[in-house]
Image (tube, rainbow, N blue to C red):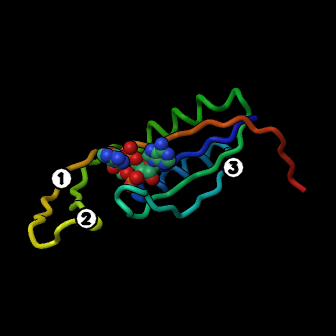
Amino acid sequence: MKLVVAVVQDKDALKLVEALVEKGYRATKLASTGGFLREGNTTLLLGVDDAQVDDVVAIIKAVCHSREQLVTPLTPVGGPVDSYVPYPVEVLVGGATVFVLDVVRFERV
Ligand code: 2BA
């Protein structure tokens, strides 16, 4: 068994959960925050059979889209505030960031 951990954009989360549940997968949806943008995103946990991992990743790929996002960098900590002019920069936010972990033990009690 594997645990698929997928960090996705909030905009894609609902559609993704619907697509996964429709195909019979069990999912847990967690509200999370990206360390870089410090904005909300969604982390999904899915316990699946080894043979189902590719299908789950394919569904994630089909539903989740990359988007460009403008970010205004924060003032560097301890740096000069008056001379620092923060220009917005564009970052490409995935798609999805997917981790696949081995599950040592799984029980539903
Ligand atoms: P954030 O950390 O808020 O990152 C959002 C986007 O900002 C990233 O998109 C990437 O394009 C950019 N970014 C992140 N760190 C950067 C850095 N040090 N320098 C320059 N640009 C940077 P994604 O790569 O698609 O990541 C989307 C979200 O997935 C991340 O939100 C984070 O919540 C999660 N994530 C990505 N890689 C991860 C990892 N190795 N471990 C844990 N979570 C991860």
- The residue carrying pointer 2 sits among few (fewer than 14), some (14 to 19) or many (20 or more) residues within 10 Å by Cα, namely few
Q: Up-down: is 41 above or below 56?
A: below
- The image position of residue 26, as x and y in percent, is 69, 49
Where is mark 1, residue-wise? Answer: 89
State the separation of the CA atoms marked 2 and 3: 38 Å
Where is mark 2, residue-wise? Answer: 74
Q: Going from the N terminus, do you reach mark 3 or mark 1 first? A: 3
Label 2 with label 3: CB-CB less than 8 Å: no
Amino acid type indicated by mark 3: Arg
Q: Up-down: is 41 above or below 57?
A: below
Label 2 with label 1: CB-CB less than 8 Å: no
Q: Can residue 93 be seen in this view?
A: no
- The residue carrying pointer 1 sits among few (fewer than 14), some (14 to 19) or many (20 or more) residues within 10 Å by Cα, namely few
Q: Can residue 26 be seen in this view?
A: yes
- The residue positioned 58% from the left and 61% from the top of the image is 30
State the separation of the CA atoms marked 2 and 1: 11 Å
- The extreme bottom residue here reads 82
- The residue positioned 86% from the left and 53% from the top of the image is 108
Mark 2 element type:
loop
- The image position of residue 109, as x and y in percent, is 90, 56
Label 3 with label 1: CB-CB less than 8 Å: no
- The image position of residue 39, as x and y in percent, is 38, 63
* Residue 26's disc number: 3
Q: Going from the N terminus, do you reach mark 2 or mark 3 first? A: 3
